[in-house]
Image (tube, grey):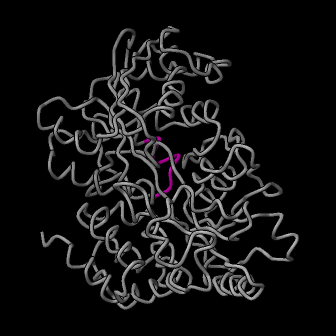
Amino acid sequence: MRTLKRRGFAAVAAGASVALVLAGCSDSDGGGSDEATADVDCADYTQYTDEFGDLEGKTVSVYTSIVDPESQEQIDSYKPFTECTGVEIAYEGSREFEAQLPVRITAGNAPDIAYIPQPGFLKSLVADFPDAVVPAPQAVIDNAEEFYTDSWVDYGSVDGTLYATPLGANVKSFVWYSPQEFADSGYEVPTTLDELMALTQQIADEGKIPWCAGVESGDATGWPATDFLEDMVLRVAGPDVYDQWVTHEIPFDDPAIVESLGAVGDILKNPDYVNGGLGDVRSIAAAPWNEAGNGIPDGTCSLHRAANFYQANWDESLTVAEDGDVFAFYLPGETADDKPLLGGGEFVTAFADRPEVQAFHAYLSSPQWADAKAQVTGQGWLSANTGFDGSLLQSPIDQLSYDLLTDESYEFRFDGSDMMPGEVGTGAFWKQMVDWFVTDISDEQVLSNIDAAWPTS
């Protein structure tokens, strides 16, 4: 791993802002699971007081887009740290996080810690507020070097300086299916893109519509389509071209990207392949992304590309497992040896360097915190921390995701739109992909339109 500069040290759930304080040795946080503290040996936490001194009664403010009901899981995961160090955590979750964080920094009211959902947003904060974002302390750097791969460290760094470490992670390169349908129909899980397309045609030849898809997501409509293209760029053009595309070293409408969008269109623009149980190709633009896969257990479609966190959208009566009602397989590469992996996550970023803030950031970058978080989370969360005890994950798809995420034979890349400038990644990219479904716009033109939105400076 290259030398880091040294210094003294999913999805947003619907709901209103929440501000809560978690105090050490206190049960006044409104309830929640005690699993994370059931077997805590505070001797394991003396490292924080040894390193940072007496922390009793100190408070660290946390600002994040993670709101109810997931906020309680976050708060519960801090209990071992707060009970053993005496630090209080003032937690505030808001649906307006990304808009309000720069406002708060400008007003001199930055939180001590924020959970940044995109590396691109982190880079813009460092550029716009270079004196406000605090480089990671040495204890965090040490954890990053020991427990995270180079790619995850790079995503949390700006110009070679580590600012942020991963909080949670997700894996997006999945295709959901019905294990029972596959068994009954004699379908095999594909290991290459060609096999995936052959399976798609086989299902269509049997008189069924193989795929279902939806990209409607309120103000974020279009993002599932950007994920699909990113996955295909990794497979058709390769990770090196993907890196150049995300940073605009090549134009958005480079021939390699046109070819990749064509591969997406081979599935999503083919009326024989979509949109199972939902309508024609144009229906993809209006179908809610969190409901689009419902055709799999209903028998109206067989395949749906979505991340591991899609499991939260299945009916509670369904079993998510390899031998259950629904499960997912890895979206394969061009060959069985090509193993690109698309994912995302949030990053812990500090705006203060007081000892208690440094200690809490160190905790959040440690296997201790990842283990505590897993014990209070039912499903839909995993960690990129290689010291994390993956056996604590309670969902089979999360366990599979963690296996892929920590398998060095897979080449991980972060969600591309999250790394692009906002006017592109969450602006033109989303909008143009929606237009791609509902108009006759060509692959070349939609990509050219997105490229035109890239800022010139």
Front residue of this view, candidates 198 and 124: 198
Relative to 385, say whether 8 is above or below.
above
The N terminus is located in which quarter? Answer: bottom left
Q: Name the one closer to the observer, 450 or 184.
A: 184
Q: Position of residue 289 (x, y in %)?
A: 51, 60
* Magenta span includes 193: no
Q: Position of residue 371 (x, y in %)?
A: 61, 34
Q: Main secondary structure of the magenta part?
A: helix
Q: Is residue 140 above or below residue 340?
A: above
Residue at 65 percent across and 50 percent down: it is 314
Q: Quadrant of the C terminus?
A: bottom left
Q: Is residue 149 within the magenta segment?
A: yes
274 or 344: nearer the eye? 274
Q: Position of residue 7 (x, y in %)?
A: 27, 39
Q: Quadrant of residue 261?
A: bottom left
Q: Residue at x 46, y 41 (%)?
A: 13
Q: Quadrant of residue 388?
A: top right
- Left or right: 25 in relation to 439: right
Q: Eyeballing the image, is 67 above or below 383? A: above
Q: How many marks?
A: 0
Residue 448 percent coordinates (x, y): 27, 84
Q: Residue at x 25, y 54 (%)?
A: 123
Q: Magenta region: which residues?
A: 142-150
Does 184 appear above or below 144? below
Q: Is residue 30 left or right of residue 226?
A: right
- Residue drawn 36% across and 9% down? 57
Image check: 267 left or right of 286?
right
